[in-house]
Amino acid sequence: MRLRRVVPDGSAQVFVKLEYFNPTGSYKDRMAKSIIEEAERRGDLKPGMTVADASGGSTGSSLAFVCPVKGYHFIVASSNAFAMEKLRTMRSFGATVDLIHSPSGEISADLIPSMIRQAQEVSNRSDCYYSDQFNNLEALIGYEEIGHELVKQFPDGIDAFCGKDSEVELATVRIVVLEPASSPVISKGWPEPTTSRA
């Protein structure tokens, strides 16, 4: 979709890719699919097995959608610190949601590590595969599909791209990074407040 109102006259044509058309409304559907399919290809994930991971909701929703389509049950370690809508979405797709209680209802320094440990413990079962979204490089395969689509959608070329250079691998494309002013991790070194539940 071309941005017409927020781009000044005389500037480049700026387009955004609407990833909310994916099944769960997130670009993470692509990475969930690639994680599962690569595990199948390697033989680490076989019919009848269960997939486990930790998630605040977006990746969890994507895995909760992909897993049953591919014939797997999904167990996710999450927390009441995350949006109820995301927890409901994961459950509605059939996932078992193991909640780690946050007394304050907020994300603390030890919450995510606790969720990861819970998912790892579940995946110690012989019939379980730990998809390990935080370290699984096979997620990049799904993200690269975005670049392939953009190259097809813009046959006359792209001058600049906001994202990872692995997504659009063309020598003539300038890769730039954008960050929200409310969470300037790259430029200032601090994230948005942990009370945010987006």
Image: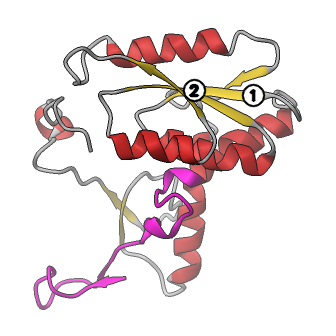
Question: What residue sits right under mark 2 in the picture?
Answer: 53
Residue lying at 45% horizontally and 43% vertically, measured from the top left: 88
Quarter containing the N terminus: bottom left
Residue lying at 82% horizontally and 13% vertically, measured from the top left: 126
Distance of label 2 from label 1 (alpha carbons): 10 Å
Please provide percent x and percent y for residue 152: 59, 79
Q: Which residues are magenta?
A: 1-29
Who is closer to the viewer here, 117 or 156? 117
Task: Check disc 2 and give the amino acid type.
Answer: Asp
Local SS, label 2: strand
Please provide percent x and percent y for residue 10: 14, 90
Please provide percent x and percent y for residue 53: 57, 26
Classified by dominant secondary structure, the portion drawn in magenta counts as: loop
Left or right position of 162 against 103: right
Instruction: Give neighbour class at mark 1: few <14, some 14-19, many 20+ (Cα, 10 Å).
Output: many
Who is closer to the viewer here, 161 or 69? 69
Quadrant in which residue 17 is drawn: bottom left
Instruction: Give neighbour class at mark 2: few <14, some 14-19, many 20+ (Cα, 10 Å).
Output: many
Quadrant in which residue 192 is drawn: top left
Task: Check disc 1 and give the amino acid type.
Answer: Thr
Local SS, label 1: strand
Left or right position of 48 against 4: right
Question: What residue sits right under mark 1 in the picture?
Answer: 50
Q: Is residue 173 above or below residue 179?
A: below
